[in-house]
């Protein structure tokens, strides 16, 4: 499982003109799955995201989590996180999990986030062509893999 977490001042995701989710200050979390990922890993990642201390405290140090700052999370599935462009010009996505295994993992990940941050989690739509708009705050961007 691979996540790209971006600290944002605001973000939204739309598909075919419909706003699927929008948040104020918080995190945009792009999430991809690969073979061997399971619900336990998705739970671990959700806990990591919610408790990751990348928001500034009163002294200006990254010492607070999205939970600590009453922030929001926008989760967006992104199989291209497992794209391999080392050979040729066209990336291979063979390492990305197939939809039949990735969809329940994504749904479980989002459900876990919602349990950890009630009322503060929005999400995209798995498999949809989406546009993600965000204002990266910092900028702070982390890649987390497990």
Image: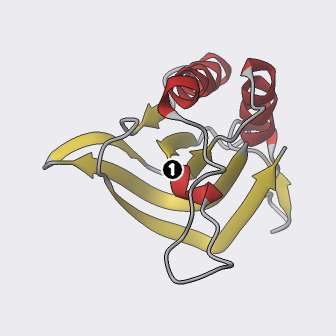
Depth check: 57 or 117 in front? Answer: 117
Q: Quadrant of the N terminus?
A: top right
Depth check: 89 or 113 in front? Answer: 89
Q: Give the image location of residue 13, x and y in percent.
A: 34, 50
Farthest residue in the bottom direction?
Answer: 89
Q: Give the image location of residue 121, x and y in percent.
A: 50, 32
Q: Give the image location of residue 28, x and y in percent.
A: 54, 52
Identified at 65% across, 20% down, the residue is 112
Identified at 66% across, 50% down, the residue is 95
Identified at 71% across, 49% down, the residue is 2
Left or right placement of residue 64 versus residue 119 in this view: right
Q: Which residue is mark 1?
A: 78
In this view, 40 is above or below 146: above
The answer, for residue 54, to whether it is visible in the render is no
Q: Quadrant of the C terminus?
A: top right
In this view, 48 is above or below 10: above
Looking at the rendered structure, the number of numbered marks drawn on it comes to 1
Left or right placement of residue 33 versus residue 24 in this view: right
The answer, for residue 88, to whether it is visible in the render is yes
**Element type at marker 1?**
loop
| Rendered image quadrant of residue 93 | bottom right
């Amino acid at each position: 499982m691979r996540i790209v977490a971006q600290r944002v001042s605001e973000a939204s995701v739309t598909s075919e003109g419909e706003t699927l989710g929008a948040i104020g200050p918080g995190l945009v979390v792009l999430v991809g799955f690969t073979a061997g990922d399971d619900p336990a890993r998705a739970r671990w990642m959700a806990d990591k995201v919610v408790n990751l201390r990348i928001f500034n405290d009163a002294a200006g140090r990254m010492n607070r989590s999205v939970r600590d700052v009453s922030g929001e999370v926008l989760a967006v599935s992104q199989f291209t996180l497992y794209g391999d462009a080392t050979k040729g010009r066209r990336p291979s996505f063979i390492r990305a999990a197939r939809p039949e295994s990735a969809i329940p993992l994504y749904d479980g990940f989002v459900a876990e986030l919602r349990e950890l941050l009630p009322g503060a989690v929005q999400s995209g739509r798995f498999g949809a062509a989406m546009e993600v708009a965000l204002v990266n705050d910092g900028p702070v961007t982390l890649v987390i893999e497990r």
